[in-house]
Amino acid sequence: TQLLEQSPQFLSIQEGENLTVYCNSSSVFSSLQWYRQEPGEGPVLLVTVVTGGEVKKLKRLTFQFGDARKDSSLHITAAQPGDTGLYLCAGGDNQGGKLIFGQGTELSVKP
Amino acid sequence: NAGVTQTPKFQVLKTGQSMTLQCAQDMNHEYMSWYRQDPGMGLRLIHYSVGAGITDQGEVPNGYNVSRSTTEDFPLRLLSAAPSQTSVYFCASSYGTAPPPYEQYFGPGTRLTVT
């Protein structure tokens, strides 16, 4: 059974601080996705990383896929209150409708 | 486009009752999935479908049934509700021409409480 472990589970920081969220597995994934979810809504895709070692940037967010395709990280620079939400990583198993999700990281950015 | 719609938004059931959670999408996506979200456990796949007439089980299928008679609709049936099924349920659709996995488009969720 493929599992994804996210850490930390909770993160409370001040506006302007940097942070990193980790997503780790003992299994190899064909790709990893990162989603962001706001209260009362469904998750929304931020990025998909598909190549080992790949780095993608989305404004102040930097996503990295591990060389062995078993782990990924999300780094936020100069966090803002608008970054508050639940961040979820999800690994693909080569079937279009099947994703394995991590348990999520709840981020709170205080002004 | 309305995207993925789910009804109802909230539901309270008594133990043993049955009900159907509705999900519809107007994007002509071939893949549709049902997830449940519980605190500290992320999203867990219940059932999914790769096209009309084709369904398969996910990680936590027990107590739930699905069918996919059309591309647009993917209802989730709770056969005999149990308190352990108290959760937030999300329906999602996806499509793609490149190798999977594909971006999941999620509905707004149904919050279910079983007493």
Image (cartoon, coloured by chain):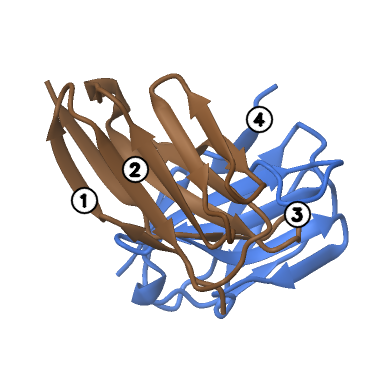
**Residue neighbourhood size for the residue with mark 4, other residues' Cα within 10 Å, grouped as few (<14), some (14–19), many (≥20):** some
Closer to viewer: mark 4 or mark 3: 3
Q: Nearer the viewer, residue A75 or A109?
A: A75
Q: Position of residue B115 (x, y in %)?
A: 30, 70
SS class of the residue under badge 3?
loop
- Chain identifier for the brown-coloured part of the image: A
Q: Quadrant of residue A48?
A: top right
Of callouts 2 and 3, which one flags the residue occurring earlier in the amino acid sequence? 2
Q: Which residue position holds label 3?
A: A96
> Measured along the vertical axis of the image, is residue B65 above or below residue A58?
below
Residue at mark 4 to residue at mark 1: CA–CA distance: 31 Å
Q: Amino acid at mark 2?
A: Leu
Q: Do discs 2 and 4 belong to a common subunit?
A: no
Residue B94 appears in the figure: yes
Q: Amino acid at mark 1?
A: Phe
Q: Which residue position holds label 1?
A: A10
Q: Quadrant of residue A28?
A: bottom right
Q: Position of residue A50 (x, y in %)?
A: 66, 47
Q: Which residue position holds label 2?
A: A86
Residue at mark 2 to residue at mark 4: CA–CA distance: 22 Å
> Measured along the vertical axis of the image, is residue B15 above or below residue A69?
below
Q: Position of residue B90 (x, y in %)?
A: 52, 50
Q: Nearer the viewer, residue B85 or A22?
A: A22
Q: Residue at x 50, y 78 (%)?
A: B80
SS class of the residue under badge 2?
strand
Chain that bears disc 1: A
Q: Which residue position holds label 4?
A: B3
**Residue neighbourhood size for the residue with mark 1, other residues' Cα within 10 Å, grouped as few (<14), some (14–19), many (≥20):** few
Q: Residue at x 69, y 63 (%)?
A: A93
Q: Are marks 2 and 3 in contact (CB under 8 Å)?
A: no
- Chain B hue? blue
